[in-house]
Amino acid sequence: MTQSSYTTSKLAEEKVFKDPIHRYIHVKDQLIWDLVKTKEFQRLRRIKQLGTLYLSFHTAEHSRFGHSLGVYEIVRRMIDETFEGRDAWDNNDRPLALCAALL
């Protein structure tokens, strides 16, 4: 598989994460799914986004993993709803923008 076909290849079945803010986060791209599956990205599940705030506020449970997926979802929606199909937008930039948002 060439690099360009890898960056544009889609999953046979999209992956969906349930999220308290965005309701659902959809992952359709193979490149994004491969990044999410890495042990380095999975480690973000154990890193607290809000530091020790959970000690004072028991519902303040938010991880870097959830934060990264949330940023990814916002950028994915922006691209899909705002830029997709416009002359000024290069579709080859989509994987780069999504990876940057995720990481």
Image: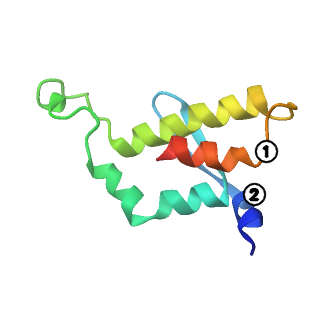
Left or right: 61 in relation to 103 = left
Q: Nearer the viewer, mark 1 or mark 2?
A: 1
Query: Which residue carries the number 2 mark?
Result: 8
- Packing grade of label 1 (10 A; few <14, some 14-19, many >=20) is some
Residue 84 in the figure: left or right of residue 75: right
| Residue type highlighted by circle 2 | Thr
Helix, strand or loop at label 2? It is helix
Q: Position of residue 12 (x, y in %)?
A: 74, 62
Report the residue marked by disc 1. Answer: 91
- Farthest residue, direction left: 55
Locate the N terminus and report the quarter of the image it occupies: bottom right
* Residue displayed at 57% across by 40% down: 25
Q: Position of residue 47 (x, y in %)?
A: 26, 47
9 relative to 24, above or below: below
Report if the CB atoms under discs 1 and 2 are less than 8 Å apart.
yes
Q: Position of residue 8 (x, y in %)?
A: 75, 57
Identified at 64% across, 37% down, the residue is 76
